[in-house]
Amino acid sequence: MEGRPALPRGERLGPAACGLIASIGIAQVPVVRRLRVAYFSTGDEILSLGEPPREGAVYDSNRYTVHALLTRLGCEVIDMGVVRDEPALLEQAFTQAAARADAIITSGGVSVGEADFTKAMMKKLGDVAFWRIAMRPGRPMAVGRIGNAVLFGLPGNPVAVMVTFLAFVRPALLAMMGATPAPPVLLKARSAEPLRKKPGRTEYQRGTVTRTPDGGLEVRITGNRGSGVLSSMVQANGLIVLHHAQGNVAAGDEVDVMMFEGSI
């Protein structure tokens, strides 16, 4: 319509938006530059690919998961590898990350019982707003700032890393990019099975949504529910969102599902 903007400020330039701009003869538009995000894993037990296996150690899957999530989002990723649980190395990594990036993401070192070097360094170098969230998986999560960089300290468990990224980090990074904030679109589906849930925290359970013979939508829990089992995320096509005040779910009850398409 004449006199109205073709695209509002804060619109992400997807395929349709790019085509719309071209259709009205505009060759260039002002955009926000790509967000720079520095990422590293922490822990003496973390192996980089190519290192020989050793007892008590695990290969670093989180770095590759987070790299893929950030790439899908359109960020410029600064991969800083694995940082050992040594204060001097952690201080150097945080300082370099804050100097180079708009946001810093770490995994590991924020859970109760883990080596507290990462927590101590975050407190020493920056301002941490909070450490824990009433959610599952992903309760231990740090959010704050080091210098001009926003800090996201994610848990070490692979599924918890993905869930906290989708629920918190992704919306925050989109806002930093200048995108207009928008809550996730939640799909309604009937649970194929009873789900146990304690009121007082939000839970994100991995699920697969399918269409039933009568045309409705049904969701079923996928795979092993452990927070370290990534195969359950591969099998799932969304997260069942059980809200803060919600209790147990009976088979046949409607639940909300945050679908993965476009996110992972």
Image: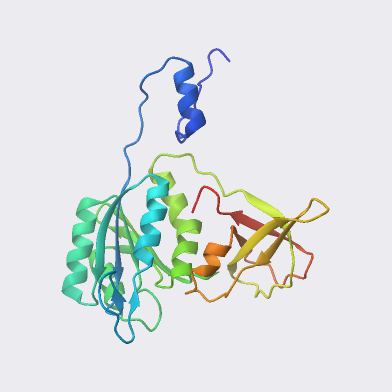
What residue appears at the point 32 percent right and 41 percent down from the top-left corner? 34
Check the image and report above or below for 248 versus 98. Answer: below
Give the quarter of the image for residue 48. Answer: bottom left
The image position of residue 133, as x and y in percent, is 49, 68
Q: Is residue 209 left or right of residue 10?
A: right
Q: Is residue 79 left or right of residue 228?
A: left
Give the quarter of the image for residue 54. Answer: bottom left
Number of numbered discs overlaid on the protein picture: 0
The residue lying furthest to the bottom in this view is 55
Q: Please say which color scheme the image uses.
A: rainbow
What residue appears at the point 35 percent right and 77 percent down from the top-left corner? 58
Is any atom of residue 241 visible in this view? no
The image position of residue 94, as x and y in percent, is 23, 63
Q: Nearer the viewer, residue 39 or 58?
A: 58
Q: Nearer the viewer, residue 251 or 197?
A: 251
Give the quarter of the image for residue 45. Answer: bottom left
Check the image and report above or below for 223 versus 211. Answer: below
Is any atom of residue 151 visible in this view? yes
The image position of residue 148, as x and y in percent, is 26, 51
Q: Nearer the viewer, residue 215 or 77?
A: 215
In the rendered image, the quadrant that contains the N terminus is top right
Q: Nearer the viewer, residue 77 or 208?
A: 208
What residue appears at the point 34 percent right and 73 percent down from the top-left corner? 59
The residue lying furthest to the right in this view is 214
The residue lying furthest to the top in this view is 2
The image position of residue 114, as x and y in percent, is 35, 81
Check the image and report above or below for 216 versus 46. Answer: above
